[in-house]
Amino acid sequence: MPKHRLVHDEPIASVGQAHLAARAPDLRLETDVRGKPGKQQPVGREHTPHLLHHAAKVRRVLGKVQDGAADHRIHGGVTPGKLFELTDPEIGTRQVGGQLRCDHPHPVHRLQILIDGEALEAVSQEVHEVAAVSAACVEHTPAAVEAAPQHLVEEIDVDLAEQRPELGARKRRPHIPYYRRVMRYVGALDQGTTSTRFMVFDATGSEVARRQLEHRQILSQPGWVEHDPIEIAARVSEVIAGALRTAGLTGKDLAAIGVTNQRETTVVWNPKDGRPWHNAIVWQDTRTDRIVSALEPQAALIRERTGLPPATYFSAAKLQWILDHVDGVRAAAERGEAVFGTIDSWAIWNLTGGPDGGRHVTDVTNASRTQLMDLRTLEWDDELLALFRIPRAMLPRICASSDPSAFGVTRRNGPVGAEVAIAGNLGDQHAATVGQVCFAPGEAKNTYGTGNFMLLNTGRQIVPSKAGLLTTVGYQLTGGETVYALEGSVAVTGSAVQWLRDQLEIIRSADESESLAATVPDSGGIYFVPAFSGLFAPYWRSDARGVIVGLSRFHTKAHLARATLEAICFQTRAVLDAMVLDSGVRLDVLKVDGGATVNNLLMQLQADILGVPVVRPVVAETTALGAAYAAGLAVGFWKDLDSLKRNWRPDRQWEPRWSEPQREEAYAGWQKAVERSVGWVDVR
């Protein structure tokens, strides 16, 4: 009997009092609740009550089976036992197994991984089938299954006779509806400004799988930023299929899928064939500056109705530009051959069938960023549609952010490979607010991505801003009231680091910005205002452009890298000051998330410049997590908001180090630099 090496790297939870067994083509995982922990003993028929037909496929390729001693590398509170060999005299099959002890709040029981001798050769040849068994096979006791919502479980009928014909007719048992497998995960599609990712989360909010791909930034003219919708749709398919494949999962393992997206970015396509009429116009794009300038007489109406100022940022002016400048689109819209959506609508339409019955929908958070929805009625506003000359028939149906049926189901022949409900949909910053569990009025978060976005929960109250912030929908969860928020949007933060990498080429990767900036003690008195798309909150100056001030021959690329990180923090300070003026709420701590929060120097600078502690959660990608939460709440995967709050855990906290005079002197220099950036472009 050749020895084997089995590598298993997935947490295993207690199985309670139930006898469960899972069978893959050549591998089965069994429980023995009778044996004492650490005791070696044969496993006979009496310990193998019911094998689950198709109950468990091998979920994840975590290592190869190879010669050598058994090495069960297992985390999640599970410790390995000794390798042992045994023979079942009644069956005559020689087996090799390993004992595992599960440290869990419930009573400890042993889990045994068994591979029969006849399968060892197949094990070595077919790693994808037998390298690992997911904890999904053993995690759910009958009691847990009974407690789960019925639409989250899949009946598995077991015919023991089919599974164990070697037992003979006298040992065969009747057909038993023995076990129902609970779908243990929720997926989240996060379509961002520079990349698309699909993540899978478990019930604790922990990441199980991830796949992420970048897409092109099309910069054909100064101020123009476009994306190819077809490329984005392809990336959506690739990351979903890739994440599931990498984790050894299928669509049937997902209870639901949530969608989150870059907001305001505008797509117009033909619903009959799925062809876009034009590249997507990205939220950063400023080509609509003259359209926006002409709206100044209606600024008060627009603000009162939508909570948003006239700005190139929002979708309405971008859609008007397409209707006015792309040949044939306006006429096509009248014929029903041109429809509009933000990226969430485009992604959901494709995932739910595209031209073959795809759902043309959006949610209240994304709709609130178009500048076409009334904040109070949560409906498209006819007066605003007339102002922007947009046909109502082009627009998607507005739904709650969390709904079990409104967004449809994925197609079996699509990247998910199964019919899974898309049950959550929020704009990226709203999703991050949910992911950071900012459910109480006065709670706030700041997301560091392509731009920076701070949201403060104002509860059911619509709070008009007097300090340059946006009044927006926060979220609307299943069966709940609409929650509103104040938002401070900063156009260019992470993309400024990308500019150092791609345009100036002074760093090779975004990670290098931290190490390069750390080589100097400060920025040497230079300031970088990255107003590539004008200045957003709290300034709202579309005539601003990027400037670097205070330069001398003393300064190096390291000083510029540090000034770039400081610019991110100074813009956040301006937004936070405005938020205090509008709300009267002074934060004791700032919750942060997003890709840039991995930059520890950036987080320390943020604490120094704000003068308040900054805390990063264990799961920094709270945008995707928030979309998963919205979807999971809709289908009962999570019971309520309290269960989500229990998932939030801090990872690291940074305390301010600067003195108050140092902080105020540095911010005064930033304000002088901002003054130098405005008035560069004629938008009249």
Image (spheres, grey):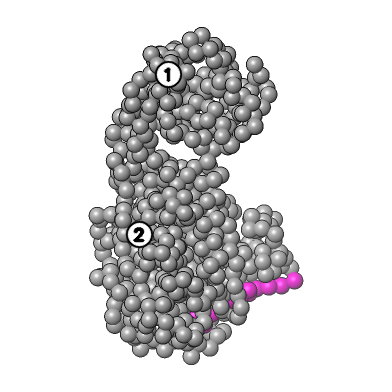
Looking at the rendered image, the disc whose residue lies closer to the viewer, 2 or 1, is: 1
Q: Which residue is mark 2?
A: 407
Q: Residue at x 68, y 24 (%)?
A: 67
Q: How many marks?
A: 2
The residue under the point 42% across, 89% down is 294
- Element assignment for label 2: loop
Relative vertical location of residue 535 with respect to residue 101 in this rendering, above or below? below
Give above or below for 374 relative to 511. below
Observer able to see residue 607: no
The image quadrant of residue 677 is: bottom right
Residue 541 part of the magenta segment: yes
Neighbourhood count class around disc 2 (C-alpha, 10 Å): few under 14, some 14–19, many 20 upward: many
Q: Residues within 10 Å of mark 1 (few under 14, many from 20)?
A: some
Q: Say whether residue 580 is magenta.
A: no
Query: Would you name the residue on which mark 1 appears?
Result: 48
Say whether marks 2 and 1 touch (CB < 8 Å).
no
Residue visible at 42% across and 77% down in the picture: 338
Q: Residue at x 44, y 59 (%)?
A: 351
- Residue 439: x and y, percent? 32, 53
The amino acid on which the numbered mark 2 sits, given as a three-letter code, is Phe
In the current view of this chain or complex, which residue is farthest to the top? 89
x and y, in percent, of residue 74 in the image:
54, 29
Amino acid type at image mark 1: Thr
Considering depth in this image, is 663 or 35 the residue closer to the camera? 35
Work out which quarter of the rendered image holds the N terminus and state it. top right
Where does the magenta region start and end?
535-553
